[in-house]
């Protein structure tokens, strides 16, 4: 007597397994691409949030001291702990335009301009205008009438195009 092998076969064929593996691979690829895009957008959102936070801290400093703080190698001096709890750092890894930015636009290095060697994917504070000295909490402090805060967006975010941006007391350009 001969047994019918087709009725008792309870496994998958090689072709069926390959089709399932191909479908799972395709779905995984789509998910990873979406995840990378979401991470890039979150880094740019963090950059804008950091600049909003720094703008608030600088305006609080200005209101209390009638001027903006001096710089310590691209970092505003005297903001911690009264005006900001911490100073933000640009998120990593650098992406898009931030990966290639190496200096500020314009006449860098000239009097009243930041240096040409601003590292990529950083925030760089630069006080501007004629400095003056006032006593802040009994300590002579150098203050400035304005500032520029350089930062970079890796990709278009909201109404802001990718690339270098400068935050000033008047807003972001």
Image (cartoon, rainbow, N blue to C red):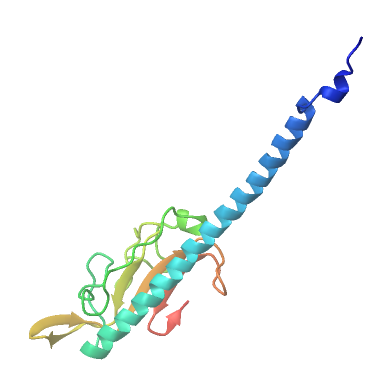
Furthest residue in direction top, as rendered = 1
In the rendered image of this protein, does residue 54 appear above or below residue 31? below
Residue 110 pos. (x, y %):
32, 69
Furthest residue in direction front, as rendered = 1
Q: Which residue is painted at 41% across and 67% down in the image? A: 151
Q: Nearer the viewer, residue 31 or 92?
A: 31
Q: Which residue is painted at 76% across and 28% down in the image? A: 12
Query: Left or right: 20 with respect to 153?
Result: right
Residue 23 pos. (x, y %):
72, 41
Q: Which residue is painted at 34% across and 58% down in the image? A: 117
Q: Is residue 153 visible?
A: no
Residue 35 pos. (x, y %):
57, 54
Q: Nearer the viewer, residue 54 or 35?
A: 35
Q: What is the count of numbered marks?
A: 0
| Location of residue 26 (image quadrant) | top right
In the rendered image of this protein, does residue 135 appear above or below residue 91? below
Q: Which residue is painted at 28% across and 66% down in the image? A: 74
Q: Is residue 139 visible?
A: yes
Q: Nearer the viewer, residue 163 or 108?
A: 163
Query: Left or right: 31 with respect to 126?
Result: right
- Quadrant placement of the N terminus: top right
Residue 58 pos. (x, y %):
30, 80
Q: Nearer the viewer, residue 2 or 119?
A: 2
Furthest residue in direction right, as rendered = 1
Query: Left or right: 69 with respect to 146?
Result: left
| Location of residue 59 (image quadrant) | bottom left
């Amino acid at each position: 007597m001969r047994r019918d092998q087709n009725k008792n076969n309870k496994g998958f064929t090689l072709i069926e397994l390959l089709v399932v593996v191909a479908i799972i691979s395709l779905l995984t690829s789509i998910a990873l691409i979406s995840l990378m895009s979401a991470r890039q957008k979150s880094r740019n959102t963090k950059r804008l949030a950091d600049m909003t936070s720094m703008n608030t801290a600088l305006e609080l400093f200005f209101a209390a001291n009638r001027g903006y703080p001096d710089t310590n190698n691209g970092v505003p001096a005297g903001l911690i702990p009264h005006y900001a709890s911490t100073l933000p750092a640009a998120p990593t890894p650098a992406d898009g335009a931030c990966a290639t930015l190496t200096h500020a636009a314009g006449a860098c290095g000239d009097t009243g301009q930041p240096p040409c060697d601003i590292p990529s994917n950083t925030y760089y504070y630069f006080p501007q205008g004629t400095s003056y000295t006032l006593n802040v909490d009994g300590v002579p402090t150098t203050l400035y009438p304005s500032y520029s805060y350089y930062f970079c967006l890796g990709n278009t975010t909201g109404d802001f195009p990718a690339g270098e941006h400068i935050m000033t007391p008047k807003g972001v350009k």
